Image (spheres, rainbow, N blue to C red):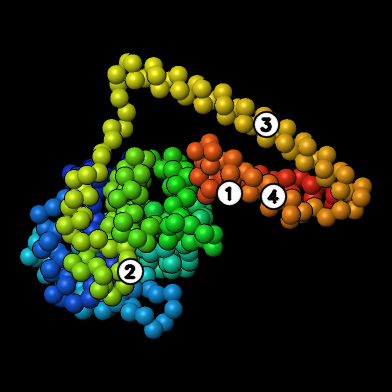
Amino acid sequence: MENSPALRNWLDTMNLPHPLVIAGPCSAETEKQVLEIAHDLKDTDVSYYRAGIWKPRTRPGNFEGVGAIGLKWLQRVQEETGLKIAIEVANKNHVDLALEHDVDLLWIGARSTVSPFIVQEIAEALEGTNKIVLIKNPVNPDLSLWLGAVERLHKSNIKNLGVIHRGFSTYEKSKYRNIPEWQLAIELQTRFPDLPLINDPSHITGKRDMVFDVSQTALDLNFDGLMIETHCDPENAWSDAAQQVTPAALVQMMQDLKIRKETDQETEYNTQLSNCRAQIDIIDNQLIETLGRRMKVANDIGQLKKQRNVAVLQTNRWNAILGKMILEGESKGLSEEFVLKLFKAIHQESINHQEKIINS
């Protein structure tokens, strides 16, 4: 996919505010609920009103959405409040109904992004449309799969594209429902700076009291907008109750969030920034040199193990190192999550080196 300024066209030509705010309930439950929330949001910074019409659930038996009748309710939202409307689509039938009911923005969910077959079906159904289409990251942290979905839609002559970062599933213990893996969103943003990037703090956190902090982090990283689940009675929502905020809480959040400048032309700022970056460059080079020396020692260990026919993985030793480094990291202001990821990567590289030596 070419990195074209046209990708950002819909953000510019529609003169949308920054950050773009997409808000509304996880699920459309009743016509009364949909309209009540919409009227609470109509005179706020919300540009698009979202509501789940079809809800793909992990297991059957849970509430799976009201279906096509909810589209009629959203049309009333358009008529009564002037808000643009947004829904998730997961197949051709969803797309056809969305277009028939003049939905303004469609997004492809994380469960759909994992399947090139589903994405291709949706791309063909949307071919040539001027509707805005956003693609959520796949459930697992796979940047190629995410970009592949964007490319399929781009090849279907869909110009108004963007992506939604909603975090990634993990078996590891985490304070998040879906860990952010910010580096993947940053890499996508770096490779395609003209592709609008929206953050979904509701699905990342799974908890309403964490939504503000993740939203601020996203804005600090220069995301273009936020998708925040909003409900008039979150505690009694039919789906994802714990992560939805009230319209009043959303309004307060929008007032409290700090919008950062992309840069500053003031000379003193740029001088200080250059000095700090020079220091980071030196430290980064030292880190690479240190890691290189560590792998040389790992190679020596691999040679010893080969001579004595000893297994590569020594679980007790690894657990001892990990526990010690977590404590050391905490004393230096490093989070346990970061230290775990860092040393798991280092440990895996050491194992790779030793296996190569033992099997040579």
Quadrant assignment, res 255: top left
Q: Residue furthest bottom?
A: 61
Under mark 3, the amino acid is Thr
Mark 1: give few (<14), some (14-19) or many (20+) Cα within 10 Å. some
Say which label, 4 or 3, has the lower sequence index. 3
Quadrant assignment, res 193: top left
Please state which of residues 201 and 144 is positioned toward the viewer in this rendering. 201
**Residue at x 38% of width, y 73% of height:** 56
Say which label, 3 or 2, has the lower sequence index. 2
The Cα atoms of the two marked residues, 3 and 2, are separated by 45 Å
84 sits to left or right of 203: left
The Cα atoms of the two marked residues, 1 and 4, are separated by 13 Å
Say which label, 1 or 4, has the lower sequence index. 4
Q: Are marks 2 and 4 in contact (CB under 8 Å)?
A: no
Under mark 2, the amino acid is Asp
- Foreground mark, 1 or 2? 1
Residue that label 2 marks: 240
Q: Classify mark 1: helix, strand or loop.
A: helix
Image mark for residue 290: 3
**Residue at x 20% of width, y 73% of height:** 71
Image mark for residue 320: 4
Q: Is residue 209 visible?
A: yes
Q: Classify mark 3: helix, strand or loop.
A: helix
Say which label, 1 or 3, has the lower sequence index. 3
Mark 3: give few (<14), some (14-19) or many (20+) Cα within 10 Å. few
122 sits to left or right of 284: left
Image mark for residue 340: 1
The Cα atoms of the two marked residues, 4 and 3, are separated by 21 Å
